[in-house]
């Protein structure tokens, strides 16, 4: 499924014959699962050097390979009736940034150590739709609309591709009059309790799926700590992780 999306190599490229894309992809996934440094990638497994896999990952990220793969898998899940568009859930989760760089900042939950934050939106069954990486001190509320608008058009069923959930449950950290107004303009019902008011009964049962999705996302050890200084290279690991979660869900629907 991934191979048709990979950019082809020139037929007459200078230098030795490049390592096969399949082996480089396996090397990238090995690092995603095990969180080892590029230079420690075991050569005996045939992946090529860590430098080779690093450059190949950068090339694929520039070609938008993994985001395209994520959209294809979402479309297949939609065709199988898996996504629950009755609601979408949003939440942010902090991670430590080992080397600093753009989109890092003092973490308010980790003694102000340098970190980043993953902002996630998923459907009502926990399928990841969009992840945004920001500095750790960025307020969740500021990325609510960016997450909603960042949901890709999901085809797979008759009619126009789906891009909007019917409702958006959130905790009091997402309480904002401006965001409520913008969500209603997008025909999305905000289910967010106001600060100082009692919590909405049963809201936790609607939102537990997003915490579960974060647990799946950070199960990939390389995403539990950010080691890349460049945000686009860190996101190059986030996108295949989301695609893998979708692929596992899709396998349940296939004989």
Image (cartoon, rainbow, N blue to C red):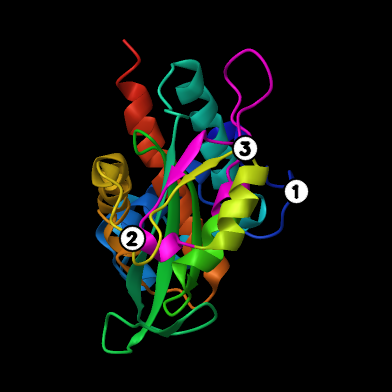
From this viewpoint, is residue 105 visible? Answer: yes
Image: magenta residue range: 147-175
**Dot 3 lies on which element?**
loop
Q: Of marks 2 and 3, which one's residue comes earlier in the chain?
A: 3
Residue 161 is one of the magenta-drawn residues:
yes
Q: Which residue is mark 3?
A: 187
Instruction: Quote the CA–CA distance across marks 2 and 1.
Output: 67 Å
Front residue of 202 and 69:
202
Q: What secondary structure characterizes most of the magenta part?
A: loop
Question: Residue at left 38%, top 25%?
Answer: 250
Instruction: Quote the CA–CA distance across marks 1 and 3.
Output: 52 Å
Q: Of marks 2 and 1, which one's residue comes earlier in the chain?
A: 1
147 with respect to 186 (left or right): left
Q: Which residue is mark 1?
A: 12
Pointer 2 local density, CA inside 10 Å: few below 14, some 14–19, many at least 20: few
Give yes or no for contact between labels 2 and 1 (Cβ–Cβ under 8 Å): no
Q: Which residue is mark 2?
A: 197
Q: Position of residue 162 (x, y in %)?
A: 60, 29
Instruction: Quote the CA–CA distance across marks 2 and 3.
Output: 24 Å
198 with respect to 103 (left or right): left
Front residue of 69 and 160:
160
Q: Of marks 1 and 3, which one's residue comes earlier in the chain?
A: 1
Residue 151 is one of the magenta-drawn residues:
yes
From this viewpoint, is residue 16 visible? Answer: no
């Amino acid at each position: 499924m991934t191979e048709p999306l990979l950019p082809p190599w020139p037929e007459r490229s200078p230098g030795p014959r490049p390592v096969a894309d399949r082996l480089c992809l396996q090397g990238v996934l090995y690092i995603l699962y095990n969180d080892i440094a590029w230079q420690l990638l075991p050569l005996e497994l045939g992946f090529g050097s860590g430098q080779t896999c690093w450059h190949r990952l950068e090339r694929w990220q520039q070609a938008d390979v993994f985001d395209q793969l994520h959209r294809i898998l979402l479309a297949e899940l939609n065709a199988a009736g898996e996504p629950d568009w009755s609601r979408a859930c949003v939440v942010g989760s902090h991670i430590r940034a080992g080397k600093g760089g753009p989109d890092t900042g003092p973490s308010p939950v980790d003694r102000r150590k340098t970190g980043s934050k993953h902002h996630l939106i998923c459907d009502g069954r926990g399928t990841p739709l969009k992840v945004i990486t920001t500095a750790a001190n960025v307020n969740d509320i500021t990325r609510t609309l960016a997450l909603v608008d960042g949901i890709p058009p999901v085809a797979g069923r008759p009619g126009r591709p789906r891009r909007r959930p019917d409702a958006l449950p959130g905790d009091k950290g997402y309480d904002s009059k401006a965001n409520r107004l913008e969500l209603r303009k997008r025909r999305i019902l905000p289910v967010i309790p106001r600060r100082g008011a009692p919590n909405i009964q049963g809201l936790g049962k609607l939102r537990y799926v997003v915490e579960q999705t974060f647990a799946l996302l950070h199960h990939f050890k390389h995403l539990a700590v950010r080691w890349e200084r460049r945000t686009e290279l860190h996101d190059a690991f986030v996108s295949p992780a989301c695609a893998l979660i979708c692929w596992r869900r899709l396998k349940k629907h296939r004989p």
